[in-house]
Amino acid sequence: MLTVHHLNNSRSQRILWLLEELGLEYQLKTYQRDPVTNLAPPELELVHPLGKSPVLTDDAITVIESGAIIDYILRHYGAGRLQPEVGSDGHEQYLQWLHYAEGSAMLPMMLKMYTARLGDAGAPLQPRIGEELQRHLGYIENALQGVDWLVGDCFSGADIQLSFVAEITPLLYSFDTLPNIAAYRQRMQKRPAYKAALKRGGFYAYGSDET
């Protein structure tokens, strides 16, 4: 049985969404952030030494990292859904987007959030971080020009992986200059499986206000 070790207000929400899209049965074990530090509780370290979420367990197998978890679920339980055929040009594009979300896009976003807490001490870094943030958001914005979804204009696991980037973008950058990303985020949040995942996972600060 698949078990998602789910931390509130975290990237593990997209794993619940994937499972709901596939209509798979799964168990949910929920962990709450420390109200003072906002860090994950130490109980997660009993599942994996890094103590991070998401973590997926499948009987004796433990998988960490959102991209690896999405890949594992689709390879073992997807039955060919939500990804292009392996070996196709579309699949190569899919893999790039799947890894791009965390490998590149999230770095300037995390730096922006962390250095903002430093006040004046973080000010010298802001121009460089801002340039990188603008570069990556511009890249995604252009990729979504004239299409609904990133890979062959078909909804895929790559869109689920990139959802967190789209969801936290308005915390860091105005959607006024990013209409394609704003519309992309709305399309995601209107999907029935997305809404089902919100109900299953509990309050999610970056999710849709719709029920």
Image (tube, rainbow, N blue to C red):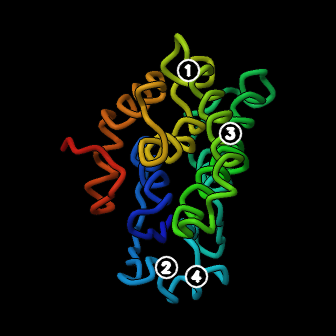
**Residue at disc 2, secondary structure:** loop
Mark 2 or 4: the one toward you = 2
Mark 1–mark 3 Cα distance, whole angstroms, equals 20 Å
Classify 10 Å Cα crowding around label 3: few (below 14), some (14-19), many (20 and above).
few
Question: Which of the two labelled residues, at mark 2 and mark 4, occupies the earlier sequence position?
Answer: 2
Residue 118 at x, y percent in the picture = 56, 70
Question: 144 above or below 188?
Answer: above
Question: 46 above or below 143?
Answer: below
Mark 4–mark 3 Cα distance, whole angstroms, equals 38 Å
Residue 47 bears which disc, if any?
4
Residue 190 at x, y percent in the picture = 30, 33
Question: Which of the two labelled residues, at mark 2 and mark 1, occupies the earlier sequence position?
Answer: 2
For the residue marked with disc 1, what is the amino acid?
A: Leu
For the residue marked with disc 2, what is the amino acid?
A: Ala
Q: Name the residue that disc number 2 marks.
A: 40
**Residue at disc 3, secondary structure:** helix
Classify 10 Å Cα crowding around label 1: few (below 14), some (14-19), many (20 and above).
some
Question: Which of the two labelled residues, at mark 1 and mark 3, occupies the earlier sequence position?
Answer: 3
User: Which image quarter: residue 211?
Assistant: top left
Mark 2 or 3: the one toward you = 3
Mark 1 or 3: the one toward you = 3
Mark 1–mark 4 Cα distance, whole angstroms, equals 37 Å
Classify 10 Å Cα crowding around label 2: few (below 14), some (14-19), many (20 and above).
some
Q: Name the residue that disc number 1 marks.
A: 144
